[in-house]
Amino acid sequence: MIPFRYNLRSLLERRATSAMTVLGVGMVAMIFVILFGFIAGLQNSLLNAAGAHNYILVSRGAPQENASRVPRDQLDTIRVYPAIAQSADGEPLISPEVIAGVNVSRDNRVKEFVLLRGVTPIAYQVHSGMHLVSGRWPKRGSYEWVVGQKASVRFPYLEPGSQFHYDRREWTIVGVFSDHDSARESEILTDHDDLKVDRHWTDDTVLHVMLKPGSEAAFQQAIKSDGRLRLDAIAEPAYYAAQTQIANQLRSLGLVVAICLGIGAVFGGMNTMYTTVARREREIGVLRVLGFPSSNILVCFLLESALLGLSGGAAGVLLAFAVASAIGLSGRLMSVGTLFFSYRPTPAAVAAGVIVAAIIGILGGTFPAWRASRVGIIDSIREA
């Protein structure tokens, strides 16, 4: 096997071309790291909203919460199911909720919608991750809001003590809540009955229930077999995972752009390696004279190209962190629709950038390495 230091020496001898190749591959790796960091932040925000033993009940066929309507009789039927967990006071852990959209922009020309969710006090036990950061929970009949932590950062004027005109009245903001960095922090909470009265609604939008551990299968079967119900029961982890489809769409769009750049980087690396092979035909001939077989030559040049790719991957990771720091990505809230989330450069995002860079390096070096392994001993020395 040809010594590894031979490859390192070769790369150092052609610093300029090596650096250009590394930079090209690094740009692609940087895009992958940032792209996957965005996707990880979005998915984290959605998946953190799920309770391990929680189910969401929507009207049959509704694709998501705000497209659902649940009549009062459905709630009364569900409330007595034995699979539903109970609070310390013996109350079923079932949270009837109503959802509306509210434009919280101060500029009438701009639309910035946030979900306004009406809940009863039992919701704070069903959604066990919700905790007050400041202030208190809304009181029935007072027309009050508690703002999610992300929404409060995005709209700093929605602060405790302030008022906001919505629909036909002024609502007073009385607190800020957190929920493990989940999608709920993008919402505003209010009293369940206050919102229904204000909107003249009789039905609920959705029901969230906490089940007793191990009763999930029995609960689903009961929902399906009960002819009085017209509801779909979905485990919260499955429901919120399905809502990450938008993350998959963003991933697909980003991958198209990254692949186009990657193809350019592959051809750039290929051109570099072909030039390298042409300049080193005499070296290749000498290696063959010294007894190294063509397979060793092939591996040698593939390894050299892979090193360029991995170096590009490392450069891309550093570039991604530098760009994120320079423009404040880590401390900035991004939004998709009514959902706010933070950029999260996870180990998976870093690994994706490095792996893609290595693949680009190997693909770019495959054909030049094959050509190098086929260089004849006599011809290479004669041409040199």
Image (tube, rainbow, N blue to C red):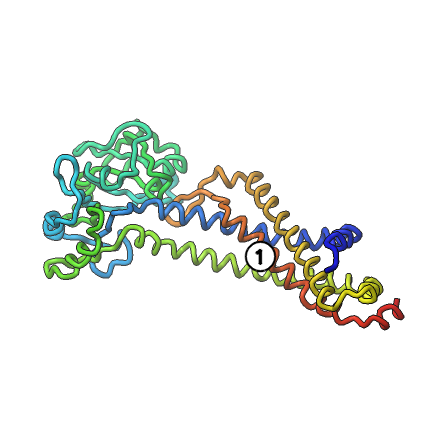
Structural crowding at the residue carrying mark 1, measured as other residues with C-alpha within 10 Å and reported as few (<14), some (14–19) or many (≥20):
many
SS at badge 1? helix
**In the rendered view, does 204 fall on the left or right side of 296?**
left
Q: Is residue 279 visible?
A: no
**In the rendered view, does 54 fall on the left or right side of 109?**
left
**Residue at position x 13%, y 51% from top?**
78
**In the rendered view, does 112 fall on the left or right side of 10?**
left
Front residue of this view, candidates 157 and 73:
73
The C terminus lies in quadrant: bottom right
Q: Estimate the x, y position of residue 360 in percent, counting from the top left.
A: 62, 60
What number of labels is visible?
1
The amino acid type of the residue labelled 1 equals Val
**Residue at position x 42%, y 54% from top?**
247
Residue matched to label 1: 356
**In the rendered view, does 246 fall on the left or right side of 130?**
right
Q: Estimate the x, y position of residue 306 in percent, counting from the top left.
A: 66, 57
Give the quarter of the image for residue 257.
Answer: bottom right
Front residue of this view, candidates 142 and 132:
132
Q: Estimate the x, y position of residue 35 in percent, counting from the top left.
A: 51, 51
Q: Estimate the x, y position of residue 346 in percent, counting from the top left.
A: 49, 45
The N terminus lies in quadrant: bottom right
Give the quarter of the image for residue 172.
Answer: top left
Q: Is residue 347 visible?
A: yes
Front residue of this view, candidates 282 and 79:
282
Residue sitting farthest toward the front: 291
